[in-house]
Image: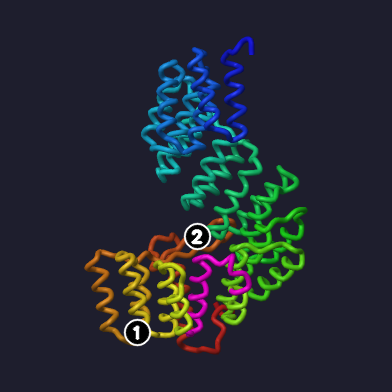
Amino acid sequence: MPKRDVESATAMIGHFAKQNQHREAILCFLRMLHLNIRPNEYTFGTLLHSSVVLKDLHLGKQFHAYAKKFNLNSNVFVGSAISDLYVKLSNLEDALRAFQDIHNPNVVSYTTLIHGYIKEERFDEAVVIFRSMPERNVVSWNTVISGCSQIGKNEEAVNFFVEMLREGVIPSQSTYPCAMIAAANIGALAMGKSIHACAVKFLGELGLFLANSLISFYAKCGSMEDSLLVFHKMRERNIVSWNALICGYAQNGEANGAIEMYQKMKLMNINPNSITLLGLLLACNHAGLINEGYKYFNEDRSLVKAEHYACMIDLLSRSGRFQEAQRFLRDLPFDPGVGFWKALLGGCQIHLNLELGEIAAKKILELDPRDVSSYVMLSNAHSAAGRWQNVLDVRQKMREKGLRRIPGSSWIEIGSKVHVFVTGDKRHRYKDEIYMALGYFIEHVMDSQDADPVMEF
């Protein structure tokens, strides 16, 4: 070229980056400096992204230093890229310092920082930053909704989605799956249906990713008819679509439905993957179909992973076939983790195999000395067998280690409102009425096993 300037050099760097040739892009930048061509904000934006893709924090820090040298770190485009680098490769404090250097941060700058706080599970601080944004777009709303969903703040995710609509922001194709997953996790069927209706209204045709989320949502809420309806209305399907349906049937204890869908999938020449196999094994597990479980496990051993071995051990243990379960454990091609021994312990609890249960519990506690659930399962097994001294011994060990049982929880949706309960709940506003009804049912059942207390109540 007769004339090489910052525009042509940046275009070359950008071309290499788009072709995923990030090291060539960096060499081009070095050549640019050698020719005394001063980089601009677009040059650094591309280079900082390349260092993120390469996961090279040291390189990213060098680019940050160069940006400071050329007084570009305060530029909103460069500053946002630096903040994103530290969110993804370093720590929140570095990202916050980079954000504070930006003059007039924009919605991208704020959204990047919010993502960093959510990634560190500092949810309350993320919400404060979100509320302080001078303007919010669909990307910033998506960030906070998906972030809530990923860290288990499911009710908050749904509430943010509703608030987004009230503020007149139209959701994008990627907003809905996060909201659907959150609604599924709290079993909010009515709310999920409203989100589904909203997606139809604003999007018309649902994308593949959203349709797959809907299949999983309805399955988790126990409505396999709706799952099947969404599946049949899809114009295109992939392996995820079939897996969502197979796993949905498995989760709802409908083993025949899962097996039938698997057979249809095979007839359409769609190759199963490890998730398909896991769904089939879960279906066999719920229905106690041991022979079928063996059949699918051995059908394609290239798909078998650690979780499939654990599922088979769980299936055999729950069915009381402890010798086969132990043989599976002994022949594992890797060292069994806590989950494998828990599967065995669960079966021992059901069939009151206390001797083997104590061995399994001992193995679990060797791997994870603070695992509360293994103590609880062992205590329950002793309790069912009437070995009360052993129950007291287990509980004493828990107290000595300072371990506390996490209370069980459940929820029910009434009139689009989700009511959450924990074991021995005393905080619900209708607690008096609930305990009165419960007391009535217990008394009625104890008086007569033949009466229908629901009709009389």
The residue depicted at 67 percent of the width and 76 percent of the height is: 256
**Callout 2 secondary element:** strand
The residue depicted at 49 percent of the width and 12 percent of the height is: 36
When the figure is inspected, residue 81 is found, relative to residue 370, above or below; the finding is: above
Q: Amino acid at mark 1?
A: Glu
Q: Quadrant of the N terminus?
A: top right
User: Horizontal and vertical percent for residue 244?
Assistant: 64, 61
User: Horizontal and vertical percent for residue 203?
Assistant: 72, 43
Q: Which residue is mark 1?
A: 355
When the figure is inspected, residue 248 is found, relative to residue 78, above or below; the finding is: below
Magenta range is 298-321
The residue depicted at 34 percent of the width and 74 percent of the height is: 361
- Which label sits on residue 419? 2
* Residue 45 horizontal side relative to residue 443, left or right: right
User: Horizontal and vertical percent for residue 357?
Assistant: 37, 80
**Callout 1 secondary element:** helix
Between disc 1 and disc 2, whose residue precedes? 1
Towards the viewer: 351 or 44: 44
Say if the magenta span includes residue 281.
no
Label 2: few (<14), some (14–19) or many (≥20) C-alpha neighbours in 10 Å: few
* Residue 324 horizontal side relative to residue 200, left or right: left
Residue 131 appears in the picture as rendered: no
Our reading of the magenta stretch's main secondary structure is helix
